[in-house]
Image (tube, helix red, strand yellow):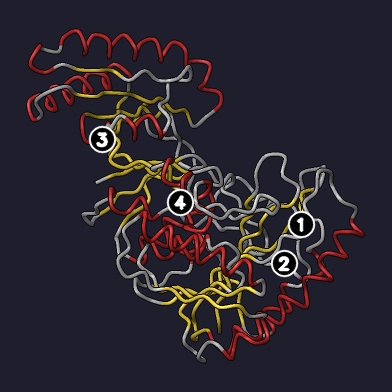
Amino acid sequence: MKYIFHLGRIPALSIAEIQAVFKKIEANYTIDLVNSKVLILDIENKIDFGDLLPQMGGTIKISEVFDRYKSLDEALEKTVSAVQELSEKRSGKKIIGYSIYFTQNEEKDKALEILEKVKRKFTGIKKDGSENSSIRIVPSDKNGQLNSASVFKNKMIKKGAEFNFLFKTPPSLPLSGEKLVNLSLSEKELVSLPLSKKKSISSPDKRSWGVILSKTVAIQDIKSYSERDYNRPKKDTKIGIMPPKLAQIMINLAQIKKGEVIFDPFCGIGTVLQEALLNDYKVIGSDANGEQIENSKKNLAWLSEKYILEYPNYKLFQSDIKNIIKKIKRNSIDAIVTESTLGPVYRKVPSQAEIKHNYNRFVKMYTGFFQIAKLILRKKRRIVITIPAYKMKDGKYITAPFIDRLEKIGYSVTSPLEQKFIIENVKITNRNSIIYDRPNQIVAREVFVFENK
């Protein structure tokens, strides 16, 4: 069965997470289509996406494909029959909605015409509904889309359906025998590192379909993410706190089994720990700052009560990096997922001298941590970590110049994204990392996956 994964703001991270999760649950699939907005997979396994999606921070929603159609009229006729089938199966009011997506900017000039046509068809569906099978249409926004909160709040998946119209998406995979670029880069080339400028590897669109019709089967619970971010008892607005969605993605990139142990040595207020607990991992957190340990305790106690975690398995202790080995047994950790300091917060781009000064302060801390981690992390297990990167005015990034030192301790940088997913607009850097930033943000996060060799 084919499913569309609607990707988050950083598509490389979204796809990397999907790839990692499917490997963990041993799902068999083939790639039908991949670009920077959606990933369409033909999946052999039967998967409960309603259960799986809350564990994934990088996918906005998942929809099940009906078919490809040459025209919008054909897709709309299928929508009518799908609503009729729903009315026969379900009594009472049905909550129906629709979203329209374009994956090529040049197609957006047709959006208004298409939106009006879809509106008319859905208005007709509502009028045709019998009294015993009433229908309520949830209005889309001016772009013809429903946001996640609206779909979730209206319980559209349980009480009706959201139909998705995806227009003219050409395939974007390498042609058979086509060679991908070499992503290796030496240490001396890392200053002012741009995102990889790979040649376009898009194959020509030989298919004649014009629209893919799908029905939403799972959607992100935005409210829950917001509560875990902003409503927990302890917050720190003075520093850049890792978003819960990013924490989830990084946990999934660690690729460990449920019930195994995740360690965060810079746990702060406990964002990684809370997301790991919710996904049934055992967690250990430490921090050199005793106040942050107390904050983590209060946040995890709040989480355990709110989500009814009867036996939350976590351990917290105060420690600097060099003394961690006194608290944790050797070779006992299955994955380390963490974010250390991002350094100063900037409102304007700092000078290269200041950035160099920051990295000189960071290098001792990171090398010390990776040396200790070597003792407690099991062999061939992963460290998933963010390291600060600085976005310059020209859009390029100045990145940490000490990654080779970390590798020499006994680690290898593992690409979070398999080559079959790497295309022009799904960006990874030339050293197999992924940049996570927000618009107008100067200090970004460079996400690395290290493997303990």
The residue depicted at 49 percent of the width and 82 percent of the height is 380
Quadrant occupied by the C terminus: bottom right
Image quarter for residue 179?
bottom right
Determine contact: label 2, label 3, CB under 8 Å.
no
Name which residue type carries label 3.
Ile
- Residue 319 lies, in percent from the top left, at 63, 80
Q: CA distance from mark 4 to mark 1?
A: 27 Å
The residue depicted at 66 percent of the width and 56 percent of the height is 445
Residue hosting label 1:
193
Disc tally is 4
Q: In terms of secondary structure, where does tag 3 sit?
A: helix
Q: Earlier in the sequence, mark 2 or mark 1?
A: 2
Q: Would residue 134 appear left or right of 67 to someone viewing this image?
A: left
Q: Earlier in the sequence, mark 1 or mark 3?
A: 3
Residue hosting label 2:
185
Residue hosting label 3:
157
Residue 202 or 191: which is nearer the viewer? 191
Q: CA distance from mark 2 to mark 1?
A: 10 Å
- Callout 4 environment at 10 Å: few (<14), some (14 to 19), or many (20+)? many
Q: Earlier in the sequence, mark 2 or mark 3?
A: 3
- Callout 1 environment at 10 Å: few (<14), some (14 to 19), or many (20+)? some
Determine contact: label 2, label 1, CB under 8 Å.
yes
